[in-house]
Amino acid sequence: MKKEICLSCLTVCTIMLACSTPSDKSLRSAASVIPVDLEHAGALQASQWFDTIMYVPLETSDSFLFSNISHLKVSRDQNIYFISDKSFFLFDGHTGKGKLKISRLGTGPDGYASLFDSYIDPETQEIELLDNNGKKIVVYDKEGNHLRSFAIPFMSFTLAKTDQHNYWFYNNNLPSEACNYKVTHYNRITEKSEEAYDSIDPSNLFISVRISEPCAAMPIRCLLL
């Protein structure tokens, strides 16, 4: 267990490097690695690692009003996106200007019954929304037009992808006939779970955690944060 935790923590920097494009080689070579001592945990001073901190005020017009934010992420092209008020929000990461809002709560073919997580595919720019209650992923294009939806065999709380067909889901302590594990690797082509970790104990209470967005070069254990 200790080895898994160490791998997870030390890979925070590896994720940033592995996800970089070839044009980022100069940035990778100049990147600093932040050491993590699990035996003697302590606070890190931001001033020791960063030269500049930039605040980006997000647009709060009538079209982009939001309250509680969850699952905030930054896309490869530096856009900011998150879930709020059962809607998906996308903002320009440099100017803070609102770019897109998807709010399709409902039973229609282009809607979702619940909204727990989101993902922007860096290759296709498609937006994938995780519908926990509906046990499906709803896919939209970058303009917010519905493209398709596909079912998953369990209720899940967070998602990540390693390529177009391989998904990783965190199912919390919610067992199902299809998967009795908290973390599972699901292949969309075969429609089966190919790997799974951390079996669910039904006697445990629900807990809320997040998994990092992985890259193809990441070790599998790094998903167990």
Image (cartoon, rainbow, N blue to C red):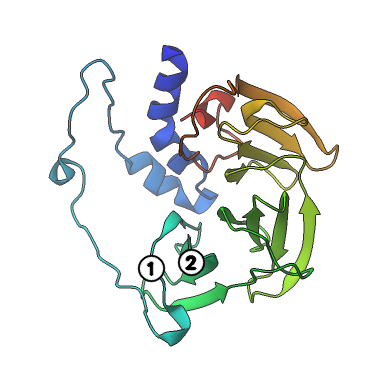
Residue nearer the viewer, 52 or 130: 130
Numbered circle sitting on residue 67: 1
Q: Secondary structure at mark 2?
A: loop
Q: Which residue is mark 2?
A: 85
Residue nearer the viewer, 73 or 101: 101
What is the quadrant of residue 74 in the picture?
bottom left
The residue sitting at the bottom extreme is 62
Q: Position of residue 168 (x, y in %)?
A: 64, 38
Rendered position, 101 above or below 54? below
The amino acid type of the residue labelled 1 equals Ser
Q: Position of residue 87 (x, y in %)?
A: 54, 67
Q: Kindly check if marks 2 and 1 are in contact, taking CB atoms under 8 A apart as contact.
A: yes
The residue sitting at the front extreme is 203
The amino acid type of the residue labelled 2 equals Asp
Q: Cα distance, mark 2 to mark 1?
A: 7 Å
Q: Residue at x 79, y 43 (%)?
A: 188
Q: Residues within 10 Å of mark 1 (few under 14, many from 20)?
A: few
Q: Residue at x 25, y 65 (%)?
A: 55
